[in-house]
Amino acid sequence: MQSTPQARWPQSVAGFGTPSCDSLGRRDERRIFAEVRFLRLADHWLESSRDAGLWGGDAFDHRVFRQYQLRWAPSVTMDFWFRGARVSPAAGRAFCEVLRRAQVLDRCQLSAIKEVLGVAAAGVDSGSAIEPVVRIESAETGSLKGRMVLAVRWENRKMKRQFLSVYIDAEGDGRTVREIHFSGPCDRFTQHLALVHEVLRSIQWQESCPPPLSLSASA
């Protein structure tokens, strides 16, 4: 896992700014998470899967899953995911703690939030004797349109896919974690990375979104 601030993607989370008014064709508003008031997806994203629910991909057990494929490269996907259950209080506190400031996370910090990382957590404690299936390349926190989030760049070697995953503290206590996973085959990932940056730059949060409790307590 890399521990340097120069994560191997075109711009850090802190670099996501105000969306530009360019000519990308018709864009549709997608209401996916309650915390996201607006999210713009260009026409080249096609919804391909969602949970069996009535509204916004919200299933009866409160899971949320919606997947979008790139029209001209269906193997490149963007998944919006909520597991339907809160993480433990200990994991929530650790998540709030790492979101206190922009930083590159070390292995100890990642180990404390393994429950938050979900499938990517397999790359945290991988032994050196065996080649790990999941390898975390970088993990850092930063401001995305005024809200602190965690971004993790990782690879699943068995699937031969690379991922950029963004983890959002939905309720300010670190326990309700929304996830956005952009992924693609290793040989196509980098060339399409600008597309997920475009989507993330368009995010507008609900004004009622609370700050992390650890921040509120220290104010």
Image: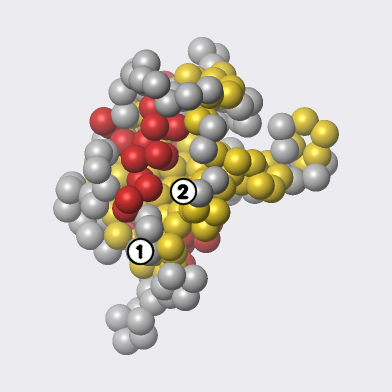
Please tell me which residue is depicted at 48% across the width and 36% down the height of the picture. Answer: 168
Residue 146 in sight from this viewpoint: no
Total marks in image: 2
Secondary structure beneath disc 2?
Answer: strand
Quadrant for the N terminus, please.
bottom left
- Depth check, mark 1 against mark 2: the one in front is 1
Of all residues, the one furthest to the top in this rendering is 207
Q: How crowded is mark 2: few (under 14 residues within 10 Å), some or many (20 or more)?
A: many
Compared to residue 94, the image places residue 207 above or below, namely above
- Disc number for residue 182: 2
Task: Please tell me which residue lies in front, 10 or 170.
Answer: 10
Do residues under tags 1 and 2 come within 8 Å of each other at their CB atoms? Answer: no
Q: Position of residue 208 (x, y in %)?
A: 54, 14
Please tell me which residue is depicted at 82% across the width and 34% down the height of the picture. Answer: 54
Residue placed under numbered mark 1 in the picture: 187
Q: On the image, which quarter does residue 29 sit in?
A: top right
Quadrant for the C terminus, please.
top left
Task: Please tell me which residue lies in front, 198 or 173.
Answer: 198
Please tell me which residue is depicted at 39% across the width and 21% down the height of the picture. Answer: 23
Residue 32 in sight from this viewpoint: yes
Please tell me which residue is depicted at 36% across the width and 20% down the height of the picture. Answer: 22
Q: Where is residue 180 in the image (x, y as percent from the top left)?
A: 51, 43
Q: How far apart are marks 1 and 2 (CA)?
A: 14 Å
Q: What residue type is labelled 1?
A: Asp
Instruction: Indicate which disc, 1 or 2, sits on the residue closer to the N terminus.
Output: 2
Task: Please tell me which residue lies in front, 141 or 66.
Answer: 66
Q: Where is residue 189 in the image (x, y as percent from the top left)?
A: 37, 55
